[in-house]
Image (cartoon, helix red, strand yellow):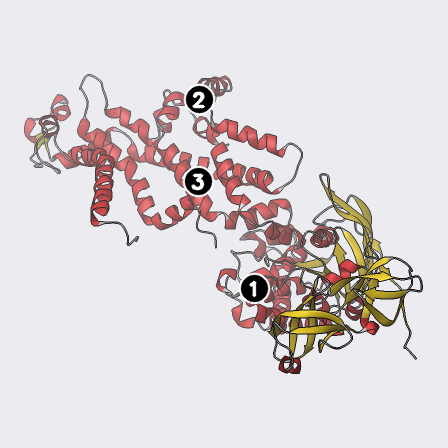
Amino acid sequence: MLGNSSPMAEALKHAVLIVGALIVILPFYVMLSYSMKSPNEILTNTGGFIGSQEKMVDDYCIKLGNPKKDCYRTPVFFNYGSAFEKAPLVRYLLNGVFVTLSIFIIQVLVALPCAYALSKLRFWGRDVVFAMVLVCLLIPVHAIALPIYLMLAKVGLTNSYAALIIPWTISVFGIFLMRQFFMTIPDDLIDAARIDGMSEFSIVWKVMLPCAVPALMAFAIFSVVAHWNDYFWPRVVITGDRSYFTPPLGLREFTGGADGDFYGPIMATATIIVTPLIVAFLLAQRKFIEGITLSGMK
Amino acid sequence: MASVTIRDIEKSFGSVNVLNGVSVDIEDGEFIVLVGPSGCGKSTLLRIIAGLEQQNAGNISIADELVDNLHASHRDIAMVFQSYALYPHLTVANNISVPLHMRRLSFLQRLPLLGRFMPGHKEIMDGIKRDVDEVTETLGIGALMDRKPGQLSGGQRQRVAVGRAMVRHPRAFLMDEPLSNLDAELRVHMRAEIAELHRRLATTFIYVTHDQAEAMTMADRVAVMMDGDLLQVDTPSNVYKNPTDIRVAEFIGSPKINILAAQVDGAGKITVGDRMLSGLYSSVKGEDIQVGVRPEALTLADIKAEGLPCRIVHHENMGSEAYFHAELNIGGRVISRMDASALDTFATGQEASIVIDPQNALLFGKEGQRLASKIEVAA
């Protein structure tokens, strides 16, 4: 803590931070609140944070021809219940876990040897290759989405896990991040490993990987969060088969259609989707921040 | 254990020449120290011997066998780095056993999880453990086996690094400034420890340092390098007493040797300032030369004595001896090392005269090459 800032300046700093935090938190507050309220409370904006939880009538239940007395529901159970019933949300979540982890693992398998070569091996054209990596960082995903879709379609890979995973397996950002981290690892360590009899591949997996855990954590956040939350790419390549849906695609189940939007179940689904990320972040908060600042070494 | 032969090694990085044809024969079991100022190419030479760097020309042989095309791991040498280069994620025991794992276990036996089920795994691991225990016993680091390098002090890390080098009984040890990260006291202690280790192992040691004191105290032979050239390879006492080049004379010895301009007349008699050095004759005649005098060969005397008049500008009391810095009236500064009792007679600010001991004066030509001299005791 700096001792020389005045109370006024401190108060101002905190005010700015509080406003910033509120702006970030507000959408989550709305999401969580709506996920617990009845449609009527959502539309009239009443009921406070958790709603009155008065029994409400499930229109869909009546449409199915059930007597009205059987169709009373508590809003919070109705919202979360329909999130799991109307959409196979567990399946979507498992798809999400499988796809995100596969992407991350393959990205690491590719990025570590690349970063090692770019930072620690001397070969002709290394700087040019690295410059190409940097240029690739500038290309937006959406610019190349169509060609990639066409290629996948040509080989008949749309509507498959492969379509969700393969386009993301080479992460130039990952290569760049790991390369920058490897630059800070002393060359002596690698020379020592060579004299000890390790091959270059052994060095990557047995020396560089354990040293790079903080940087890998940072990369893991970026990669996992981006692909867990990705709506765009799954929407492009998963055109029909709902069994390949990832969690964000699950949100679509409740939008539009003749019945109008079901905000309650949508928000319940959204809450379920973000919860694993938030829990994971809270559990490993310290490690994550260490990773981002790359201060874990020494 | 093996001899190491270095033949005409040349190395350049881009347009910068780092080594210009260095040759030296290192005998089996010898402790040789490569010493020189930073940037003289000594570390590069060591890395070429290790196989971590490829020379542009010349050969390296270990035990009379050319190793130029051998990978570092197949040269059967061990290296201790300045930064110790311990694996930060492994315990001390694992750090030391890595070279044995890589050499004794097959690829399949090294596999994580599966390796331990491969035939022969347990016997080899037991053997490795025995060898590691033996090394840690020798180095007195048995109690640290389960710590990570981050939890060790500088001296302990240094021992672990030496242990990792020792454990596979290499043919030669290469050490790249292993003591320069330690504090002064520990450095002096480790100096003795490494020299003792060399005696016990009786293996070839090639040791790189920029600290001439380390070179003088530890080496069987000192190799002085400067600007990519090997200037002199000789025993510590010869390098000190009989330097072949003025740069060697200036680099070895602390405080530094005093260099004075001198003239030689037609008869070979040498004059410094207006004083003739009695009894000393130069092999070259009628030229300007340089005279090198070690601080202990310069004594202060009363201003009226036969010597070069000077003024004492500073004195340092080292306890058992004293250093006097003096400004000569003919220009130039010299340092004299005398017994501490001289402090009773001389002090900063005083006028005095400097007397050169001709027996211990070294003559160098204008280009710095050593000149022969002849001493004739005046009748």
Q: Residue at x 59, y 56 (%)?
A: B85
Can residue B49 be seen here? yes
Image spot of residue B310 (x, y percent): 69, 69
Quadrant of the drawing holding the N terminus of chain B: bottom right
Q: Which residue is mark 2?
A: A158
Of residues A77 and B262, the one nearer the viewer is B262
For mark 2, name the chain. A
Which dot marks residue A219? 3
Image spot of residue B238 (x, y percent): 81, 68
Pointer 2 local density, CA inside 10 Å: few below 14, some 14–19, many at least 20: many
Of residues B232 and A81, the one nearer the viewer is B232
Mark 1: secondary structure: helix
Q: Are marks 1 and 3 on the same chain?
A: no
Q: Residue at x 25, y 33 (%)?
A: A269
Pointer 3 or 2: first along the chain: 2
The answer to whether A201 is drawn above or below residue B372 in the figure is above
Could you tell me how far apart the alpha carbons at marks 1 and 3 are, in whole angstroms?
31 Å
Which dot marks residue B53? none
Quadrant of the drawing holding the C terminus of chain B: bottom right
Could you tell me how far apart the alpha carbons at marks 2 and 1 are, in whole angstroms?
55 Å
Disc 1 marks which amino acid? Arg
Q: Are marks 3 and 2 on the same chain?
A: yes
User: From the viewer's perspective, is B338 left or right of A156?
Assistant: right
Q: Residue at x 52, y 69 (%)?
A: B144
Pointer 1 local density, CA inside 10 Å: few below 14, some 14–19, many at least 20: many
Which dot marks residue B157? 1
Pointer 3 local density, CA inside 10 Å: few below 14, some 14–19, many at least 20: many
